[in-house]
Every structure is written in C-alpha cells, then in structure tokens.
Image (cartoon, helix red, strand yellow):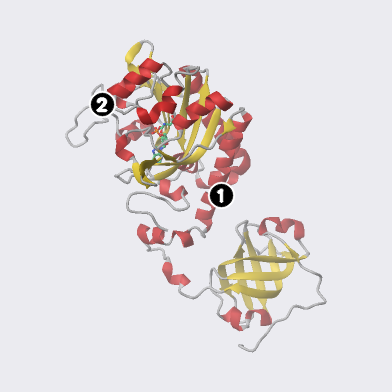
Amino acid sequence: SKKIKIEEDPSLPVATCIKIRDVKRYVDRRIAVQGWVHHMREDGKKLLFIELRDGTGFLQCVLSDLLCQTYEALTLHREATVLLKGTLTADERAKGSFPGIELRVDFWQLIGPSPSEIENILTHESNPDILLNNRHLVIRGSRTSTILKLRSIITQCFREHFFDRGYVEVFPPTIVQTQCEGGSTLFQLDYFGEPAYLTQSSQMYLETAIASVGDCFCILPSYRAEKSSTRRHLAEFHHIEAECPFINFEDLLLKIEDLISDVIKRVMEKASDWVLSMNPNIRVPKRPFRRMTYEDAIRYCQENNIYKDEATKMHFELGDDIPELPERKMTDQINEPIFLIRFPVSLKSFYMKKCEDNPRLTESVDLLLPGVGEIVGGSMRIHNLDELLEAYRREKMDPSPYYWFTDQRKYGSVPHGGYGLGLERFCCYLLGLYHVRDVCLYPRYKDRCKP
Ligand code: 4AD
C-alpha cells in the first residue's frame, strides 16, 4: 500500500474551488474543497467516508478503491486537513449540512496530517478544566462552532440596530487612567512607568463623544478583576455601550426596550433555525417590559421567601444590595424581563443622576432577564457641574484624572444617559446557555488566562 500513488486524471474537467456552503449550486459538477476531517468511517477496505468541515458547513465525501488504500489514507485521522476533488452527486443517503448531496472523490491530497492521539485528548469523561485547556480543539466541534457563529450574527445585529437608529460607532481606548465602576475590580498595569488600568466601561468616553457625533455606541472589551467565578462573570467581556444626549429617563428605558426586542427580532430573521435548535422556547419578549423600583424588589423578596441569607432566613431591608443569586431567583419567579429602577445613591456609581422627586435615589436601571439575571446596567448621568464635584467628594475620589469628564459639564452640558450590555450574557439568554464561558472563544476569568 505504501507504493500506491494516485494521480489526477488530466482528462477530467477542471475542478472549481468552492466552499461547502455553496455545494447546492454545483451538483453534478466537478469541484475541489479543502477542509478538516471532522469524522471518518471505513466501510470495508474499499470505501472511506469523510465528513469534511471547512468552517462554512459539513460535506459527506466518499473515497473508493485505490483512493482509500494509499499510505496517507491508511494513516488518516480526524482533524487532518485535505484537498478533495470530485463530482458533487445527489444521493439521498448522504448526511452533513447538506443532506442529499455527497462528493464522489476522484483525486485527493493530504495537506496536514493529524496523529492518532487526537482521539485521546478529549473524551466524554473530560472534566471542564481539560476541556478549557484544549479549548483550541473544542471550538472545532459542531456545537461550539455554531455558538461562535451565532455570536458573530448577534454582534452584527446589534451593529445593524444602532446604525438603523442613526448611531455612530466610536472606538474609545481600553487602557485608561480613570475608574468608572469602583476600585475593587480594577486591573492595574504599568504604562511606561505610570499607573493605568484596563477599562471597566467605555461610558465616560462615550459621554464625551456625544458632543462630537451625537448618539453613539461602542462594542469593546471591558475588564473586571472579579474575584469570584460565577456562571455570569468574566474578567474580560464584550461590552455593548450606548450614550444619547438630550433624553430623559423614560426615553432611556424605551431605548433599552427597543434594543432588546429589535435585536432578538433581527437575529431570528437571520438564524431562527440555529437559535431554535439551541433554545426552542425563545420568543421576542412582549413590550412594555415590567418596571419595578428597587423598593418594590426589596418588598417582593420579603414577601416571596427570597432571603438575604438563606441559612438564617434573614430578610432584605431597604438599603441592602440585592446580590446575584436572590436577584436571579426573583427574575426566574417573575419569568419576564424586568426593568429594576431607582436604586439608592449608596448602591450605585458616582456619576448617576439623582431622581428629581427623591435625592436619595438615582435615575438608574438594571434590565433583568429570566435565566441569566442582569443583562444591562444604565442610568441618566449627572450633568450639573457642582453636583458632579460633590459626587467626587462623597466617593472620596481625586477629581484630577477626571478633568476631561468634568469638562463636559462646563462646556455646553446636556441631560444625557446611556447603558452597557454584556454581550456574553445576552448570548446566554438568547441561546439558553448556562455559562458565559460557553460563548467565549477563549474565556478569561480568575485562574484562567490560557490558551
Ligand atoms: O452594570 P455595569 O457595571 O454598568 C457599567 O459598566 C456602566 N458604566 C455601563 C454604561 O452605562 N455605559 O455593567 C453593564 C453590563 C452588566 O449588566 C453585565 O451585563 C455586563 O455589563 N457585565 C459583565 N459581564 C460579564 N462579566 C462581568 N464581570 C461583567 N460585569 C458587567
């Protein structure tokens, strides 16, 4: 068998190079495809079925007779890369992304071999750590690659939503010298001898950009040194943030509602088959979303056996922060999107505008979605200069690194507001996934910075 050499028959028509997604257009034609051996199955000595993957789809390919008796064929393993040429043929037995079409191979070449150990790296028993160490191989699987493709479509739909509504995309830096969401989760780094941080949010830069381009958005990584690893916290996540001038709190809520409903609608128009195969129960949520004040939420928890401390059955009281677990419990019980609004000043960030009817509360909102919990955090911003200076003092912040942020309140200040949405959490909601890690190419969280 080592001596068997195959050569391309020069009398055959020239093969057109195609991607698997286009096979339907080439039935009965001679084509060439290149890709990875996703699965293979021998049928006796004279038939070899390869399920070929090229990133655009899966195609069943058949090698017969001498083609499957060469040295390369006998030592072929999963994940090797190959060039296959042959005729696309309608055959109802063929499986793959395009059932009913298979490639009858007449010539092939090995591009990159794969050793037999590929079969032992990942098994059904592999624990999560092994899977994460080998994430570069896991992503080749059909489920993970579908999730990654859906994340691409979802991101595209966010962009299309914003462009359709007249927003401009801007690109703030992610290495910064200010903090937006408190000091406890900052990643600090040495920036040519000066202290700097990885950004927690691009909000403050978007607030400056509204005076330049009006309504604007960005889709960039944000970083949080979250010490606990939960199913919805990452150290690096993609933050979809938007900021709008000349709006009020009610406008802000309507914009978030429009964003969520419209993006889900757009994703379903592009990829409902894939989405429904992962999450059969997903629907575009009905509008308007339920609104609940922070005070309502505390009362809800008190009345529905959701405790501050499960062990001692200690009740929440006004002023308490509602942590992730009880918040999710409440959201899952109510089982529809909830705008949680009007949080106390003491629980929220320094920049938030106070409610006109109650200076202890803020014009703030968290959007909670069933299954995941908080997806969006937003607010109206303080636009009065003295109020902002007072907020720096209250939070014991040195105002000097924030001079440019403060300047927005000096040179043509304007009522404005915005929000940030965690892309990974949104993907989990839409695709019915449990863990934000599952929608990351390479997740980053405490104790995980590879591959
Ligand atoms: O509520 P957050 O902290 O709000 C802000 O950062 C605002 N400055 C945004 C703004 O108004 N422009 O974060 C907003 C959202 C959260 O609701 C959550 O979806 C996501 O960002 N998020 C995280 N996602 C994954 N891992 C983490 N560690 C996250 N922290 C926040």
Q: Quadrant of the N terminus?
A: bottom right
Q: Position of residue 182 (x, y in %)?
A: 32, 33
Q: Residues within 10 Å of mark 2 (few under 14, many from 20)?
A: some
Q: Camera-side residue: 412 or 285?
A: 412
Which residue is labeled 1 in the image?
149
Q: Position of residue 432 (x, y in %)?
A: 46, 43
Q: Which mark identifies residue 320? A: 2
Q: Position of residue 74 (x, y in %)?
A: 57, 81
Q: Which mark identifies residue 289? A: none
Q: Looking at the image, in which quadrant does ligand 1 appear?
A: top left
Query: Could you tell me the amino acid type at mark 2?
Result: Asp
Ligand 1 closer than 8 Å to label 1 CB: no
Answer yes or no: do the residues labelled 1 and 2 have beta carbons within 8 Å? no
Which residue corresponds to the image point at 36% horizontal and 28% vertical from the top-left? 400
Q: Position of residue 351 (x, y in %)?
A: 38, 24
- In the rendered structure, the answer to whether residue 56 lies left or right of residue 226 reads right
Q: Quadrant of the C terminus?
A: bottom left
> Seen from this angle, which residue lies furthest top?
357
